[in-house]
């Protein structure tokens, strides 16, 4: 596969307790509770704590960079 998280420099793999592989993305285009870039993603929570998101290894993204 091409341009998927498992091959991206921004993605860090995590294996949780039930052995499901997922990962966190460190791309600067994904911002927490800030102004959303035109080609980005803004995420938030409802209690004003730090939020985050995971992606699966085969998730595709326009910000993919070869690792």
Image (spheres, rainbow, N blue to C red):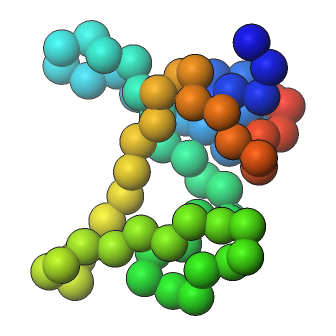
Quadrant the N terminus occupies: top right
The extreme front residue here reads: 38
Q: Position of residue 43 (x, y in %)?
A: 41, 69
Q: Nearer the viewer, residue 21 or 37?
A: 37
Q: How many marks?
A: 0
Quadrant the C terminus occupies: top right
Question: In the visual, does 62 lie left or right of 52?
Answer: right
Question: In the visual, does 59 lie left or right of 32?
Answer: right
The extreme bottom residue here reads: 35
Q: Position of residue 21 (x, y in %)?
A: 39, 18
The extreme right residue here reads: 66
The residue shown at (18%, 14%) is 18
Quadrant in the rendering for residue 51: bottom left
Question: In the visual, does 37 lie left or right of 43?
Answer: right
The residue shown at (73%, 32%) is 8
Q: Position of residue 28 (x, y in %)?
A: 68, 65
The residue shown at (68%, 27%) is 4
Q: Is residue 55 above or below residue 50?
A: above
Q: Is residue 44 above or below residue 67?
A: below
């Amino acid at each position: 596969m091409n341009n998927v998280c498992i091959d991206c420099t921004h993605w860090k793999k995590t294996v949780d307790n039930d052995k499901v592989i997922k990962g966190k993305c460190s791309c600067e285009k994904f911002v927490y509770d800030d102004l959303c870039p035109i080609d980005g993603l803004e995420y938030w929570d409802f209690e004003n704590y730090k939020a985050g998101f995971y992606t699966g290894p085969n998730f595709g993204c326009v910000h993919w960079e070869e690792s």
